């Protein structure tokens, strides 16, 4: 069965065409830096004759432009892997927010779409892009079943002590205001691998997903027990353009004293803050170059970014009363040795000690990068949200 997986992130679209159940990847690709300078589409096809690659450097102002280009590449004469869109039987969509309604993978119906749309205000950078992906895919692959895999699903095992907020009860009971958590597909995928690599029956793991959006999850015996993101994907870590944890009084101050509208505050905290707010750049590669050049803003931004992650490591280790491993993943977590080094510095009281040489190894498969004395294992495990989504889709359509 051919499953085409679309993972629309806030700044990228990743896709794979996977044949299930054999988990054979026919092609994969990335539309990178959507809405930014230097956008490009990278497509790799795994043909019987070998691997072929096509890179298109082109403006990609929106997710829709990116998806249409990807659809053309699938049937391209040189790098295409299917003759016609009708060969795609299932399209699996990453959908970021599933609210309280969706704790599992869903075949997309008009009702599911309506609910995804209702959740736009809670995930304004993501659910609109995910919804658009569904609509474009329905046009390009009209015969295929469309399936939604929610970022929030993996976090449904959190205990109330982690997901409830100390606000009036009725806001939870009537309005569903609580922490949901995101990047669940990625946290699930890398934690399952980490558990196998650790080879222990009982385990306490912290997964650190650092992409454009960033989040951390505390995972005990394979189940999520806490996570850094909340009602929407804004809370917690410092991200590409999102502030993460912030004192609520800042919001009131901006509105009441400085005259910003609520929409403007939302835009500031979601799209103009984080690393972008601190340095003028949201992409860690741009900030890394400025760090190297000794620019004070870039240095401070990196330090703030790492400091926030360290605080969550401490709090999650306390929440689980122990720690066996931390796992770095996501575009930054997998590739940026500077971030990993800043995070792991001066955490030896917790038993975390990085090996600087192992930390420099290029991003290949899963790798352990702790020093021999480290009590806690430190892993870099490349995430594969697309493969996880294909597995989940196969599970629901098979039934
Ligand atoms: N070689 C690299 N070094 C440092 N950072 C990188 C590298 N490659 C990618 N990144 C970072 O990864 C981020 C994208 O991560 P990714 O997980 O792909 O994002 P998304 O949230 O869009 O899914 C980029 O913004 C960039 O900062
Ligand atoms: C939920 C979220 O922040 O996703 P991404 O990292 O793909 O932007
Ligand atoms: Mg992502």
Image (cartoon, rainbow, N blue to C red):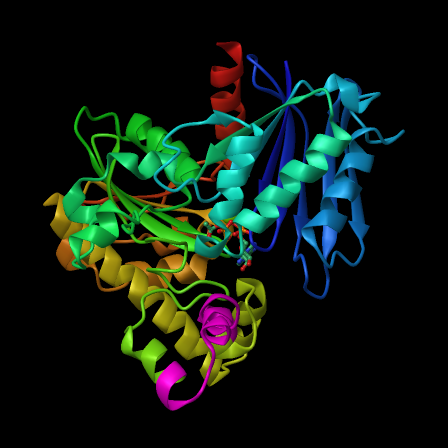
Tell me: residue 298, above or below residue 173: below
* Residue 194: x %, y % from top left: 33, 33
Tell me which corner region of the image, top left, top right, bottom left or bottom right, holds residue 248. Answer: bottom left
Total label count?
0
Which residue is situated farthest in the right direction here?
A: 77
Asked if residue 315 lies left or right of residue 40, the reply is left
Which image quarter holds the N terminus? top right
Asked if residue 46 lies left or right of residue 241, the reply is right
Is residue 95 at all visible to an observer of this figure?
Answer: no
Is residue 52 at all visible to an observer of this figure?
Answer: yes
* Residue at x-position 53% and y-position 45%: 117
Tell me which corner region of the image, top left, top right, bottom left or bottom right, holds residue 326. Answer: top left
Tell me: residue 20, above or below residue 296: above
* Residue at x-position 84% and y-position 20%: 83
Q: Of residues 122 and 69, which is closer to you in this image?
A: 122
Residue 237 covered by magenta stretch: no
Residue 258 covered by magenta stretch: yes
Q: Of residues 213 and 262, which is closer to you in this image?
A: 262
Per the picture, the main secondary structure of the magenta-coloured stretch is helix
* Residue at x-position 32% and y-position 46%: 180
Which residue is situated farthest in the bottom direction here?
A: 257
Asked if residue 169 lies left or right of residue 133, the reply is left
Q: Of residues 95 and 348, which is closer to you in this image?
A: 95
Which residue is situated farthest in the left direction here?
A: 321
Tell me: residue 41, above or below residue 135: below
Tell me: residue 4, above or below residue 94: above
* Residue 283: x %, y % from top left: 56, 64
Q: Which residues are magenta?
A: 255-276
* Residue 252: x %, y % from top left: 33, 79
Asked if residue 217 lies left or right of residue 72, the reply is left
* Residue 18: x %, y % from top left: 62, 23
């Amino acid at each position: 069965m051919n499953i085409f997986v679309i993972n629309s992130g806030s700044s990228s679209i990743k896709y794979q065409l996977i044949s299930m159940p054999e988990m054979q990847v026919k092609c994969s690709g990335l539309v990178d830096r959507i809405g930014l300078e230097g956008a490009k589409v990278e497509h790799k096809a795994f043909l019987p004759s070998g691997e072929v690659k096509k890179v298109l450097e082109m403006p990609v102002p929106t997710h829709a432009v990116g998806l249409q280009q990807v659809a053309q590449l699938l049937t391209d004469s040189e790098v295409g892997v299917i003759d016609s869109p009708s060969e795609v039987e299932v399209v699996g969509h990453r959908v970021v927010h599933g609210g309280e309604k969706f704790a599992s993978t869903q075949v997309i119906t008009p009702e599911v779409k309506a609910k995804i749309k209702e959740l736009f205000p809670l995930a304004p950078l993501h659910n609109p892009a995910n919804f658009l992906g569904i609509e474009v895919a329905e046009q390009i692959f009209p015969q295929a079943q469309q399936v939604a895999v929610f970022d929030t699903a993996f976090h449904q095992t959190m205990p109330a002590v982690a997901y409830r907020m100390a606000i009036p009860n009725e806001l939870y009971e009537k309005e569903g205001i609580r922490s949901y958590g995101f990047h669940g597909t990625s946290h699930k995928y890398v934690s399952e691998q980490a558990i196998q690599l650790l080879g222990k029956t009982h385990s306490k793991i912290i997964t650190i997903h650092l992409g454009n959006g960033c989040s951390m999850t505390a995972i005990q015996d394979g189940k999520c027990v806490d996570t850094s993101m909340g009602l929407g994907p804004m809370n917690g870590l410092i991200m590409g353009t999102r502030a993460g944890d912030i004192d609520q009084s800042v919001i009131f101050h901006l509105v009441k004293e400085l005259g910003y509208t609520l929409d403007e505050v939302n835009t500031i905290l979601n799209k103009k803050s984080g690393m972008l707010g601190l340095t003028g750049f949201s992409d860690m590669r741009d900030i890394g170059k400025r760090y190297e050049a000794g620019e004070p803003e870039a240095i401070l931004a990196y330090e703030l970014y790492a400091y926030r992650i360290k605080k969550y490591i401490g709090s999650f280790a306390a929440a689980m009363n122990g720690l066996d491993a931390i796992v770095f993943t996501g575009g930054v977590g997998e590739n940026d040795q500077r971030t990993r080094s800043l995070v792991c510095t001066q955490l030896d009281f917790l038993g975390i000690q990085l090996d600087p040489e192992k930390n420099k190894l290029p991003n290949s498969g899963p790798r352990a990068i702790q020093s021999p004395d480290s009590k806690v294992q430190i892993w870099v495990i490349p995430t594969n949200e697309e493969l996880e989504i294909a597995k989940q889709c196969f599970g629901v359509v098979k039934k």
